[in-house]
Amino acid sequence: MALHMRFFSDNAAPVHPRVMEAMAAANSLDTAYDGDAWSKRLDARFSELFERDVRALWVPSGTAANCLALAAICPPYGGVVCHRDAHIQNDECGAPEFYTHGAKLMLADGEGAKVTPHTVQTVLDAIAADVHRVQPYAVSITNATEYGRVYLPHEVAAIGELARSRGLKFHMDGARFANAMATAGCSPAEMTWQAGVEALSFGFIKNGGMNAEVLVFFDPDLVGATPQRRKRAGLLFSKGRYLAAQVLAMLDDDLWLANARSANANATMLAAGAGDRLIHSVEANEVFLRATPDEAAALRAKGFDFYDWAAGEIRLVTSWDQQADGVRPLAEAIAAL
Amino acid sequence: MALHMRFFSDNAAPVHPRVMEAMAAANSLDTAYDGDAWSKRLDARFSELFERDVRALWVPSGTAANCLALAAICPPYGGVVCHRDAHIQNDECGAPEFYTHGAKLMLADGEGAKVTPHTVQTVLDAIAADVHRVQPYAVSITNATEYGRVYLPHEVAAIGELARSRGLKFHMDGARFANAMATAGCSPAEMTWQAGVEALSFGFIKNGGMNAEVLVFFDPDLVGATPQRRKRAGLLFSKGRYLAAQVLAMLDDDLWLANARSANANATMLAAGAGDRLIHSVEANEVFLRATPDEAAALRAKGFDFYDWAAGEIRLVTSWDQQADGVRPLAEAIAAL
Amino acid sequence: MALHMRFFSDNAAPVHPRVMEAMAAANSLDTAYDGDAWSKRLDARFSELFERDVRALWVPSGTAANCLALAAICPPYGGVVCHRDAHIQNDECGAPEFYTHGAKLMLADGEGAKVTPHTVQTVLDAIAADVHRVQPYAVSITNATEYGRVYLPHEVAAIGELARSRGLKFHMDGARFANAMATAGCSPAEMTWQAGVEALSFGFIKNGGMNAEVLVFFDPDLVGATPQRRKRAGLLFSKGRYLAAQVLAMLDDDLWLANARSANANATMLAAGAGDRLIHSVEANEVFLRATPDEAAALRAKGFDFYDWAAGEIRLVTSWDQQADGVRPLAEAIAAL
Amino acid sequence: MALHMRFFSDNAAPVHPRVMEAMAAANSLDTAYDGDAWSKRLDARFSELFERDVRALWVPSGTAANCLALAAICPPYGGVVCHRDAHIQNDECGAPEFYTHGAKLMLADGEGAKVTPHTVQTVLDAIAADVHRVQPYAVSITNATEYGRVYLPHEVAAIGELARSRGLKFHMDGARFANAMATAGCSPAEMTWQAGVEALSFGFIKNGGMNAEVLVFFDPDLVGATPQRRKRAGLLFSKGRYLAAQVLAMLDDDLWLANARSANANATMLAAGAGDRLIHSVEANEVFLRATPDEAAALRAKGFDFYDWAAGEIRLVTSWDQQADGVRPLAEAIAAL
């Protein structure tokens, strides 16, 4: 299938040529695990990006990043507040429970998979503070969300302030962090630690990487036993340089932002003529539309591939590698429905 | 450091050019996770190699392969008999306990990190069959072993027969399966399922791959919930085709065997002049030598890099990418000590 | 505080004299763990009660009974559908997640903490059947429920039939099974295995016991590794006869039913004059009432002790040891509010 | 079987009459869980006994006490050094691994199941301090040991000093702490925290209790999440007063010491005529003897009951409830062998 016809997901898009080149360039001997020259650059490179000293560890999947983060901030007998449609709740086959040894996800509401201080507080207030009830230890949000919505820095900060005031740690699942940043237009610092975020799953795979994400701890001490947990989970690859190289290539010349901007722009184009069909405001690279089965079939008959969401709903995801010219026919087809 | 001077480990060697090419060739759009064309070929390709229907799943590290296998064959309240110097016991930061939810490793003796039916039985016979004692559920051996020794098929079969007779499952950690096979000269079938092995961690990373191993279940039913566990551990990569492509390239034209034969031959060359220094018979790509600190320093002064094992012992590991000419100087230096 | 003034909970009531006597009568030497004469009678005694061959294990708490049951019927990567107000979800500090090694509770709705086939099915239907989503393995209901409601046999059977049709195991948390049975008036068999229940946490502690419940598996094979799990959780007491003796005494002459009938009758008396204050229909030994803070204070000023439920709601629980005459003053005080 | 003929184990002995009386005296209404008057006295009563402020929690089994202690002092990715014949290694069906979520027991040698600073250090020194190897976090010893040997305070202190110097926590499994104390003749403080012990499983069940042990944390902060873990394991009984009452009765008038002295004296009597048959010096209430199968059969023919240890070895355990006159016939029979 032609790339520009596929809107099924961004998770299977090709790897960006500059990432492939960086991996090829790393193809010589170096120290194993994360002792190589590439891996050793991560802390400094991400500290520069985030304008403070951070710890940055490569991990090979978003699920791994999320769950190592959760294990670092929530004990086995604790709970993590997240949206009921969060990826950690619905799409990781219980990985949070596995990595945390049984912590409980506490589900909050919110439009577009965005929790708010109010919905988080509603969850918290229902929890009696005694030994019989799992107590909350952390809040986790996804930015951009599972419905392609973006938390702006002040929205993140409001949740961060609530978390801080309740003694909770604060994690951001940034599988599509680049898409959120492309929209928000703020600095990475403003979107994260300045808004109270303590751990970030910084995604690259959906955005042009192959199999490397970065788990960032804004307080270096918070990394704790994460290196041991990463090893213990079979995630400490012996040839770590090929992961670090991917990530470094993505940061060079802000490739990560350029890719995300492109995907976001194409999603916006798709939404432009969708009118009332739009279920969620399009703020990143995902478009959720109301479409009857017949309408969906009509689009598919033209060669477009996408995901059936709920009944009468379809999801279109744009990827870094699509050109505007390639996406335009679908935009026109949607407008013409 | 020049490749041919480095005998520290095979775990950081470069990736074979044909593997890199295969990954580049996979760099187009396909279905996510393991739904792509490359991943879907694994079952058939490994079934062909092993001359029976098998299930073959890519996993991104040897630790992951081993521990998914152990989780499939041993419950949380069970035990796995292995050598006390096994990788799963000493080098995986408790990954077996993590993946199995707390199973116990039961440590057997044996020269060169090879257990024998006798040493396994000694462990088994000491276990009272009651509810107070963790009961054994599996045996795991490493081939080639952590000391570069090789189990020949009849040795594997003897352990397999014991396992079968005691109702235990049988796993082989084949992080260096290729090196063992290069030495044994038998068929993959003879070394594994025909000898009673039910799950194999088939290693490629030390032998020219980047970050893909294959977990093979010889009884397809034994795969059980392994796909769920793989997902739950953050190991189900969204772009799985880059892992499958590595492995398929390694199998093409028996590259895996060619690489291993080369490394083994170079290890044999190193051992040739070592005489009484040899601690273990050299049967794969590892050479353990007695060497005083002065002798070790002398070798290092000539530029050779290697690992200090125990006091007065050094470990030299050859890699797929070294040429005989490059290795010869070290062989001569050892002989001259 | 006088017993008849306390309606805080049934979980701290005294132990019935006949239970104390039975424990004293067991105070001689016997075999340790569950090898003693009392423990050995459990299977037969409960098989008689349930009119089929069952396995019956003593456990020292309701949480232990529930969670050993869940561990027997749901793997670490699975889910258990239960009501969102279930004890296992809210009052066991994550014990289900601990015992199952991270299974997920999947929360269903329903009036009075009673799930229905419809609400269970709603949960099930939202679960995509793929490797990314935790899959359901079991349903667990509480009878009588956390709000003192009772599932009648045909209601249990309807859920049991749904469970069966979806391949799910079926557990009943019977911490107040006696209260449910006293109301339902059916046979234990009709309420459980004839309605599809496969594992029952049969509670005695709230009903006159000290620290013994019984976990009943209606299919003896389903007991699986429960004895190992019980040991492994520190629950296999060396002097098990004192637990078995409690339970056997409770079954003698249907003491369990007599105690429950008494408590239920007193709850009914409390509800008689409550009129519109009643939040849930009173079917067991719990009464939930609307009461303003002033009204609650007025009751407390008369010496009655009870639990503040949600804002403007109070919970009154009757116990086996209260006499009707002792309870009448509270009934009158409620009616007079 | 007459009590005085049974030397199988102390774990099934009757409950002391004063303990039964204390439980009966507690049989009135009180607050649930550990909010009752009896439970609330534990901290103060044990603080008095140990001459410092401690936290003392009832738990219903020795396994539970040990494993809650280990979970408090060792993370899932850590290790606990203990003797290879320790109860936690061999007799708890993997409970340490369950409660700690997969920590590893690291097995040290030592005569009579007593580790020494040297044997512990041998284990520690073999552990490379890197991310691949499980790192030690704690040491656990059993006093009296599984072979009836006693660590004197200076021996405990030597291990405690090693633990402290290596940054390891220090736990004592005192399932037979009373027997050790009866022999050592020191103060409880000298045997424990003054010798570096940070957590003690204080056993009462083998010594006249029914189903209550006490977990003592000498640093109150070390209790950490133990209350949550106790709840989460199904161990927070709703009628906790019956456990606390047992323990308090055992401490009254030093009943715990009187019982242990009696059992120890009887064991010494058994050993008196055993001569070369003695395998371990008798320092508590256990006697291990060499005896041929014929000799063992001869003793059994006289009505004595005991445990066959290894081949050619038998174990005799005396209990608190045996009188010297009752034990003398076995002593004479042994001497006459």
Image (spheres, coloured by chain):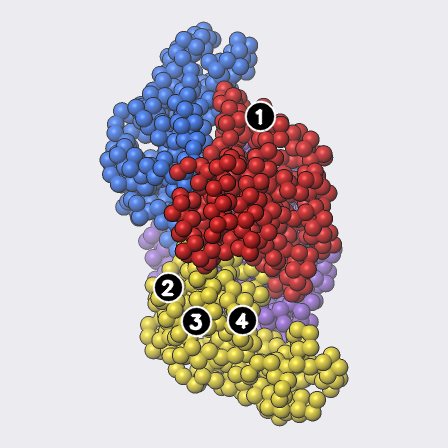
Chain colours: A yellow, B purple, C red, D blue
Give B284 or C88, whichever is nearer the viewer: C88
Q: Could you say where residue D36 lies in the image, as x and y percent from the top left?
A: 38, 39
Q: Indicate the chain on which mark 4 is placed.
A: A
B133 lies above or below C157 = above
For marks 3 and 4, the one nearer the N-term is: 3
Q: Real-space Cα distance between discs 3 and 2?
A: 12 Å
Marker disc for residue A211:
4
Which amino acid does the dot numbered 2 rest on? Arg
Q: From the viewer's perspective, tell me whether residue D140 is left or right of residue D44.
A: right
Q: Look at mark 3 in the image and give the residue it sits on.
A: A117
Q: Tell me which residue sits at (53%, 14%) in the image.
A: D1
Pointer 1 indicates a residue of which chain?
C
Going 35% across and 46% down the picture, which residue do you hit?
A: D223
Amino acid at dot 3: Pro
Which residue carries the number 1 mark? Answer: C38
Q: CA distance from mark 1 to mark 4?
A: 59 Å
Would you call the spot at circle 3 few (<14 residues within 10 Å), some (14-19), or many (20 or more)?
A: some
Circle 1/circle 4 CB separation < 8 Å:
no
The image quadrant that residue C182 belongs to is top right
Instruction: Report crowding for label 2: few under 14, some 14 to 19, many 20 or more residues within 10 A (C-alpha).
Output: some
- Taking A28 as reference, is D30 above or below it? above
CA separation, marks 3 and 1? 56 Å
- Badge nearest the viewer, 3 or 1: 3
Give the number of the mark in front: 4 or 2.
Answer: 2
Q: Chain of mark 2?
A: A
Co-location on one chain, circles 3 and 4: yes
